[in-house]
Image (cartoon, coloured by chain):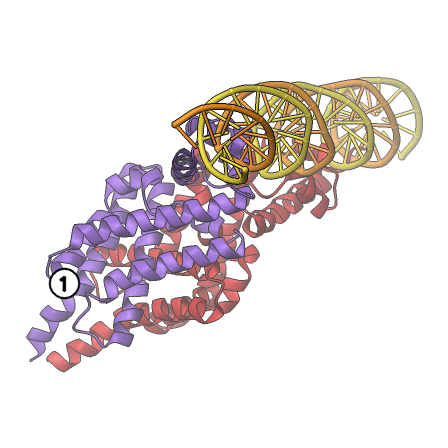
Chain colours: A red, B purple, C yellow, D orange
Amino acid sequence: MRRSRADTVKTRETIVGAAAEEFRRQGIAGAGLARLMAEAGLTHGGFYRHFASKDQLVEEACHRAMLSVSDALDRAMSGKPPEKALATLVGNYLSTDHRDRSETGCALAALGSELARADLKTRETATKGFLRFAQLIAQRLKHLSPRKAESEAMAAAATMIGALTIARIATDKRISSSILSSARAHLLGTIRGRRRRRRVAT
Amino acid sequence: MRRSRADTVKTRETIVGAAAEEFRRQGIAGAGLARLMAEAGLTHGGFYRHFASKDQLVEEACHRAMLSVSDALDRAMSGKPPEKALATLVGNYLSTDHRDRSETGCALAALGSELARADLKTRETATKGFLRFAQLIAQRLKHLSPRKAESEAMAAAATMIGALTIARIATDKRISSSILSSARAHLLGTIRGRRRRRRVAT
DNA sequence: TGTACATCAGTGAACGCGCGTTCACTGATGTAC
DNA sequence: TGTACATCAGTGAACGCGCGTTCACTGATGTAC
C-alpha cells in the first residue's frame, strides 16, 4: 500500500545504504537486487518505484560509499596538524581493520576493477571520490607547491588503494600485513623523510 | 570426434589464452564460458573435457596473464642498469597504452577487486604474481638493504596497480593521464630523488 | 473539518535471458593383438 | 604391418538457476471540494 512521503524517502535511503554495503561485500555483479532488497526489509518488486535501473543504484550507492569514507577520514584528521593528520589518514586507511571490513570501507579498493567497467555516470562519481580523497591529502602537503602537492597526493592515494586491494587478495595473513605495512612505511617516509633529510643537509 | 594428444594440448592452451584476454577485458563475472569458447573457435559443450570448473580456468588464466606481463617487463629491462631498468618498468606499466589495453595487461589492475573475492587457489596465484612483480623492482634497488628494498618494492608495485586501476575508471582523459603521470613522477622521484638529495647533504 | 477519489509504495508472480554445468552422441585417435 | 575395439575431444541440446525487469493488484496516503 501507499506510504507517506517521509517513509518513501526513508525507504530509498535504506535501499541505497544496503546497496552500498552489499556491493562492497559481494562486488557489483555479485550482488543481486532481490537479496539486496530483502536486506533492506523489502521485496524486490518495489525496486523500480525508486530507481530506473540497477545501474542507477550502483551510481548512488557508490556516491554514498565514497562520501562516508572520506567524511570519516576527514573527521579523524580534524584539528590535527598536517603531518599528524596525514599519519592518521594513512594509518586508518591501511589498517587490517579496513582490510577486513570492505563492506564499510573505500569503494575504490572494494570495487576498483569493476568500476572501470561501470557506466559513465558511475565512473564520474568514482573519479570525483578519488579526487576528493587526493585533496584530503594534498591540502596537508604544505611544504610543496599546490601543483606538486596535488601530484604527490594522487600518487599517495593510488598507493593506498592499490595496497589495500592487494592486501585483500593475499590469503596469507603475514604477506597481507606486510603489504599494508610496506605501503604505510613508504608513505610516512615520504611525508617525514623529506623533512628529516633536509635537516641533515642544512 | 577425438583429437590427437598434441591437438588436445594445443586446444587447452588456446582456451586459457582466450580466457586470459576475455577475463581482463570483461571481468571474471562478465565473461561467460560460451562466448569465451566461441572465441577459442569451439562450442561450449567441450569445456569440461579440459577443466573441472570455471574457477579452475580463472586460476589458470590468471597465472598465464601474470606470467606474460612480468616476462614482458623483465625482457624490457634486461641488460639495462638498475636505475634505467626501473624507469623503463615504471614508464611501460604506467603508460596510456597499458591503460587502454587491459586485455593484455596486468591482471591485478584489470581484475583486482574481483580477485579479492576469487577462490583460494586463484588468490594464491595472484599473490605470487604480485610478489614476482615486486621482486622485479626490489632486485634493482641496490642502494637499500634487502629488507628495505622488498618493502619499498611492494609499495611501488601497489602504487602502479592502484594508479592504473584509477586511470581506467576516470572518463576524463586529462584526469586519467594526470593520475598516471603523478604516479610516474612520484616513483621516479623516489628512485632518483634519494640519490640527488644525498649528494646535496654530503 | 469531512468526504470522495486519485495516486502510488510495496507485494508477489511472472517474463525472457544468459549463466555454469550435464549428457547422449559422433567419429577420429590410440591401443592391443 | 593390419585389424578390431576402446577411448575420448568436441558437438549441440538440455538442465535448473538467479538475474534484471515488468505487471496486475492492494490499500494507505495525498488531494480537491
Chain where mark 1 sits: B
Image quadrant where one finds the C terminus of chain B: bottom left
Residue B46 picture location, percent across and down = 53, 31
Question: What residue is shown at x 14% (from left), y 63% (from top)?
Answer: B82
User: Dividing the picture into quarters, in which one does residue B143 lie?
Assistant: bottom left
User: Dividing the picture into quarters, in which one does residue C7 lie?
Assistant: top right
User: Dividing the picture into quarters, in which one does residue A154 lie?
Assistant: bottom left
Question: What residue is shown at x 17% (from left), y 71% (from top)?
Answer: B142
Query: Height in image: D13 above or below A146?
Result: above
- Given residues A131 and B169, the one toward you in this image is B169
Q: Please state which amino acid type lies under the numbered disc 1.
A: Pro
Query: Height in image: B101 above or below A131?
Result: above
Residue C21 picture location, percent across and down = 62, 38
**Residue A104 located left or right of residue B83:** right
Residue B195 picture location, percent across and down = 12, 70
User: Around disc 1, counting alpha carbons within 10 Å, would you say few (fewer than 14), some (14 to 19), or many (20 or more)?
Assistant: some
Question: What residue is shown at x 13% (from left), y 62% (from top)?
Answer: B83
Secondary structure beneath label 1? helix
**Residue A23 located left or right of residue B191:** right
> Where is mark 1, residue-wise?
B82
Residue B63 picture location, percent across and down = 40, 50
**Residue B54 located left or right of residue A9:** left
Query: Height in image: B65 above or below A184?
Result: above
**Residue A57 located left or right of residue C10:** left
- Given residues D25 and B144, the one toward you in this image is B144
